[in-house]
Image (tube, grey):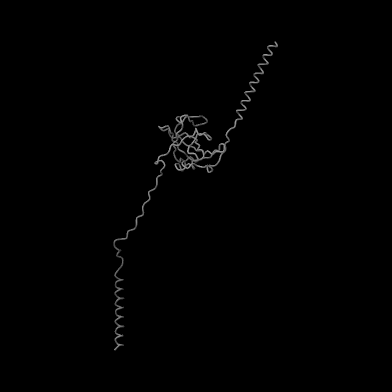
Amino acid sequence: MNTRFKILAMASAALLLNLAWTGHAMSQQSEMPRPEMDRASCEEVQWNRDLLRHYPWVVEACHEAIIVDGEKWARFEAEFDRLNRDGSITSTFRNDRGRSLGRVRLMPGRDQRVLLDGRPYRFSQLQRGQVLNFYAPEDIYAFTTQPGAPASELVQVVEPTDAEIATPQLAQAQPVADQPPATLPATAGPLPVVALAGLLSLLGGFSLTMRRRSQRLSA
């Protein structure tokens, strides 16, 4: 009887020790440091120059900035368009009012996933029209699917072609100089000619009168 009691007591003690060790391990896991996250305005983000040059609308497309461990990540919403033959994806970025601003081609890695409703999906499993969240780390020309992701999980941007970058410009018409008419319009009548002839006759008569007076005085 005593032997059975001792065995039962030893088993109970071992079970209690096991439970205590498991609880301690779980408490250590729950106390592991998590990245601190906060939010900021898109105006506080320092944008990459190449990103601004290729996609000048990117600032307007930014919805907010997520701060993870002191680093800013601009958040975007994009509508999935298609999976291209080379493995890249094309998505249409839109602003917080839902207006489409431009398309971006991204080249995800083979093992990269994107979260939809909390579940990870391959990019090849996406369907047209699904809305995705992308994040651009501050002053880096790349995107990620999660803020605070390591550099190995960056989704590279496929360089756009010149035709994709170029914006249509309105043709400016060259001003044409007004050419003077070949001949002056015949709007003047004969009145100026008659007046000029009368003035010359008057001057001629006046000079003749003065000449006669000078001859009389000299005689």
Q: In which quarter of the image is residue 101?
A: top left
Number of disc labels: 0
- Along the horizontal axis of the image, is 58 left or right of 204? right
User: Is the residue 187 above or below the residue 130 in the image?
Assistant: below
x, y percentage for residue 163? 39, 41
x, y percentage for residue 103? 44, 38
User: Is the residue 168 above or below the residue 135 in the image?
Assistant: below
User: Is the residue 160 above or below the residue 126 in the image?
Assistant: below
- Toward the viewer: 214 or 52? 52
| The N terminus - image quarter | top right
- Along the horizontal axis of the image, is 186 left or right of 166? left
- Toward the viewer: 100 or 186? 100
Q: Residue furthest right?
A: 2
Q: Residue furthest front?
A: 151
x, y percentage for residue 124? 44, 30
- Along the horizontal axis of the image, is 69 left or right of 181? right
Q: Residue furthest top?
A: 1
| The C terminus - image quarter | bottom left
Q: Quadrant of residue 165?
A: top left
x, y percentage for residue 135? 50, 37
